[in-house]
Image (spheres, rainbow, N blue to C red):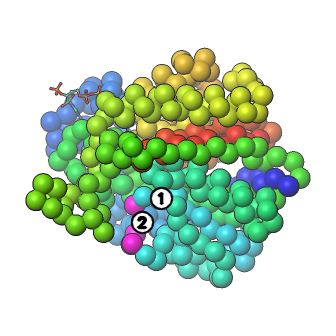
Amino acid sequence: MYSRITGTGSYLPEKVVTNADLEKTVDTTDEWIRARTGIERRHIAADDQCTSDLAVHAARLAMTAAGVQPEDIDLIVVGTTSPDLVFPNVGCLVQERLGIRGCPAFSIEAACSGFIYALTTADRFVVTGQAKCALVIGAETLSRIVDWSDRSTCVIFGDGSGAVVIQPSEEPGIISCHLGADGRYKDLLCTPSGPSKKPTADQPRDPFITMKGNEVFKVAVKTLESIVRKTLAENNMDGSEIDWLIPHQANNRIIQALSKRLKMPIEKVILTVQEQGNTSAASVPLALDVAVRDGRGQRGDLLLLGAFGGGFTWGSVLLRY
Ligand code: COA
């Protein structure tokens, strides 16, 4: 038994913040942002929109694409690091909004790898017969934990959501999943305080994202390369067999470096970072949905999804769409 994606959906908030807009609020330039990140604009949630609101939009579209009803869904897993509340988790909030009753609903916090962790978890439920129709979502409003006066981080992140429905299938479907983490890198990309960590004299409360960009960059490229190589090797495959590489959309330079190291032509890589910025756990399902809806991702295509994020966490999913 395998699981297979039967529908995809995504959502971006209406409000767009361009690099030119940021030039007015912090000491930066459109040229610097484009050259260092490839980002031109990002979508930002409205004041009254929370992560669950974004998630519900993407979920509805994925359910429509899969042709399933709320009563069909028997598992909800959400990858997010910017939940509406400490609890109830975003999965429960989505469940209530969609009129789904009784099924397990939970969130997974693995920063930008959140969707890959969520999809891997949901796949296990389907493969072992514990779920027959799982809704898997990556959704974020990282704009709420970005310090908009910090030019080194505020130019990078954006809000959005992406979702898939997975169902049992005799043919793959999801072929293999690979997850990893290394907490020794916890300080390179983090929020220095949170609900449980009390401020101290040398570490005052700071709920905003801090990042050692340069160091993150180097580990991100190496780790993404190694997870892709591992996934290919464990499946006795060559990069040339992959129809589309769908990496986490952190930074165009990271993705370009990855494509070069893997000798995978950039034309075979789905790129959305220019239009969306880094939407963390939402970025992979958003890019997947873009590829499906614009016709690049066709049924039967071999897709390799890969992500890397704070923690550090990382993961990949190889699947036949
Ligand atoms: N506009 C203009 N200048 C900026 C700036 C901005 N938005 N942000 C930083 N700078 C400045 C720095 O202050 C520094 O100035 P200095 O030399 O006078 O000290 C200079 O630009 C270079 O900074 P540096 O951090 O070395 O730049 P970089 O080439 O590493 O690019 C990132 C910065 C953040 C774009 C890059 O490191 C990166 O993309 N890292 C990975 C981040 C990421 O993907 N995180 C998420 C992972 S899931």
Q: Kindly state the secondary structure of the residue where label 1 is placed.
A: loop
Residue 135 point in image, percent of width and height: 65, 64
In the rendered image, the vertical position of residue 78 relative to residue 18, given as above or below: below
Quadrant where the C terminus lies? top right
For the point 61% across and 80% down, the residue is 99
Give residue 285's mark: none
Numbered tag placed on residue 109 in the rendering: 1
Nearer the observer, 60 or 81: 81
Q: Specify whether residue 212 is painted magenta.
A: no
Is tag 2's residue or tag 1's residue first in the polypeptide sequence? 2
Q: Residue at x 54, y 18 (%)?
A: 260
Callout 2–callout 1 Cβ contact below 8 Å: yes
**Residue 84 belongs to the span the image colors magenta:** yes
Looking at the image, which residue is at 39% across and 72% down? Answer: 86
Classify residue 34 by image quadrant. top left
Region of the chain picked out in magenta, as a range: 82-86
Regarding residue 28, the answer to whether it shows in the image is yes
Q: Amino acid at mark 1?
A: Glu
> Mark on residue 83?
2
User: Residue 206: x, y in percent?
Assistant: 21, 57
